[in-house]
Amino acid sequence: MSQPSNLGVVLPTRNSMTLLPAHLSTMKSWLDIVDEIIVIDSFSTDGTLNLLKRELPEKKARFLTHPPGLYESWNYGIRQMTTKYCYISTVGDTIQRDWLAQLQAIAESLQADVVISKPKFLMANGQPAKDLQLPIDDIIGTLKLNAPTALMPLQVLVFAIAHADACLLGSSASNLYRTAILQQHPFPTDYGLGGDAKWGVLHACDARWAVLTECVTTFLLHQVQHDHVALSAWDTVQSASDLAHTAIKRLIDDGRVTKKVLMESGALAVLDAFVKYDQDRCRLNQLRRGQWPWFTNPTALLLRCRRNSQRQRLEQAKRQALQRQTTNEIML
């Protein structure tokens, strides 16, 4: 059986001509270090496929069709991959050649299944956007990282629970994945637009994670009109809390860790603090959507104070858990 090649790219498209020429221009700088390109197109009618077939190297590119669906298309493309590593090249989000090679080098040297990094944000017109705080900022700041670093499973679990209402992975166009981990654990398709967020919580301890501290990509902030179905997972009270509970329960049920270890590591204290924070966060968000101006509602103002207080308690529980793990060398 032949050994797999190294680096493959999934390129999902759907009527992408507006952004595609500039995207291809950036891609061409690193196509020489890529062994496989899998285009997953969802019935484009604007010439997207014709342009890609003209511009991508024939020997490396495969063109597949899949019905619309963000994570469904990603998963379909990833299932076809034969390379060791997978990069998801979402149209409009760019990475330079040296940084893509760096992600791969880090994955190799640290034996990581997932290497995450933070993007620089751009407006639709290409101008720099205001920086957005992501969970990776908390990881880098709390652990005081200044170089590529492999994370311990319980560290990842604590950050995943503390940010269960966000996305530990950040932007997948800023990350590199070992293909096998995504084939074994596909992106969830039942969590609206938060499939990668759910993946990060559920598989915090299934994958070996590493962090690159530099910003290596650009992320285009789209003006997306989210429908009710896409947002339903985030609108449900305690949906993030339920997700965090599920992740903990899976670890115990699978025999990966005992409840005693989770208690000693501080992970259960983080979970308890997150649940209380999430309750107030969700209720406040409901009030904000239901009444304007929401800040004239005394109940909403009280909930905002409680939410902020609970967030501070969550931060304290997270830091205590990480300190406890380091001091006592608690590991999975």
Image (tube, grey):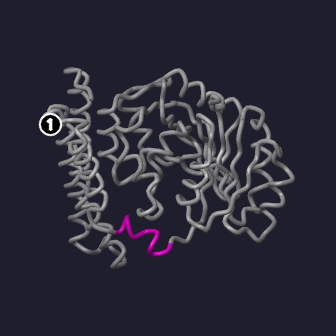
Give the residue type that dot 1 points to: Met
* Residues drawn in magenta: 227-235
Quadrant in which residue 33 is drawn: top right
Q: Main secondary structure of the magenta part?
A: helix
Q: Quadrant of residue 52?
A: bottom right
Q: Residues within 10 Å of mark 1 (few under 14, many from 20)?
A: few
- On the picture, is 266 further left or further right than 111? left
Query: Does 170 sit left or right of 81 as displayed?
Result: left
x and y percentages locating residue 20 in the rendered image: 76, 56
Q: Position of residue 81 (x, y in %)?
A: 62, 44
Residue 248 magenta: no
Q: Is residue 29 left or right of residue 331?
A: right
Q: Is residue 50 above or below residue 185?
A: below
Residue at (39, 35) in percent of width and height: 139
Q: Residue at x 44, y 38 (%)?
A: 137
* Vertical order, 306 against 253 (above or below): below
Q: How many marks on residues? A: 1
**What x and y, as percent, mark residue 242?**
26, 58
Picture residue at 49% right of the left edge, 49% below the top: 132
Instruction: Please determine whether, in this image, residue 292 is positioned above or below residue 93.
Output: below
Q: Image point 44% across, 39% down: which residue?
A: 136
Q: Residue furthest left?
A: 260
Q: Quadrant of the N terminus?
A: top right
Q: Secondary structure at mark 1?
A: helix
**Where does the image place residue 189, in percent across and percent down from the top left?**
46, 61
51 and 255: which one is in front? 255
Query: Label 1: which residue?
Result: 263
Is-magenta flag for residue 229?
A: yes
Above or below for 25 versus 262? below
